Amino acid sequence: MFRRHPYLSAATFSYLALVAWLTLSPQAPDQSDGPLWQFAVFLDQFSATEWLTFNDLEFVANIGLFVPVGLFFVLLVGKRQWWLALALAVLLTAGIEWVQQFIPSRVSDVRDIVSNSVGSSIGVVITLIVAAARARARRSDRN
């Protein structure tokens, strides 16, 4: 799998390294200076978005962070084994949350497993839709 797709493998491992850095590196106890917190403060200035909380933004950010994970995993294992890609992504996020419980400045949260799994699922579905559309276009080009 990795030998057949060396560039895809390199991109996948690079992205997983970024995910590991974002999710497993120590955090300062006060996150009020972080970019997500600053964005929440910015949105709070507007009446149309004042209902959004930091927890809501974090949930959505976690979804976005894991969309590429689902995409990369499907591309690596193949579209016929999409279920394996999704299972690997869920195991990855569960593993991250398990490790976080041993990092003093991190908090392990079931909501993160849910949001990360939703993001991975979206990545898997997008990849399958694009693959199906490309296959359909190739078939119509032959006819």
Image: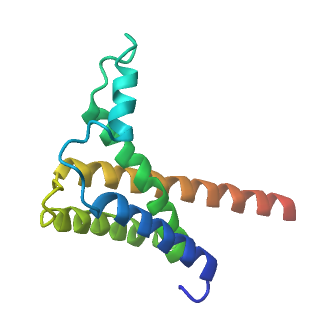
| Rendered position, 89 above or below 42 | below
Quadrant where the C terminus is found in the figure: bottom right
Q: Residue at x 48, y 65 (%)?
A: 15
Q: Residue at x 42, y 69 (%)?
A: 17
- Percent x, y for residue 44? 34, 19
Q: Which residue lies furthest to the top in this view?
A: 47
Q: In which quarter of the image is residue 136?
A: bottom right
Q: Looking at the image, which is closer to me, 11 or 44?
A: 44
Q: Looking at the image, which is closer to me, 81 or 106?
A: 106
Q: Which residue lies furthest to the bottom in this view?
A: 3
- Percent x, y for residue 45? 37, 15
Q: In which quarter of the image is residue 21?
A: bottom left
Residue 79 visible in image: no
Question: Would you say 143 lies left or right of 8 here?
Answer: right
Residue 72 visible in image: yes
Q: Looking at the image, which is closer to me, 110 or 107?
A: 107
Question: Would you say 44 lies left or right of 18 here?
Answer: left
Q: Residue at x 46, y 73 (%)?
A: 81
Q: How many labels does the image show?
A: 0
Question: Would you say 59 lies left or right of 120 here?
Answer: left
Question: Would you say 79 lies left or right of 133 here?
Answer: left
- Percent x, y for residue 40? 34, 29
| Rendered position, 28 above or below 30 | below
Q: Residue at x 63, y 77 (%)?
A: 7
- Percent x, y for residue 95? 23, 69
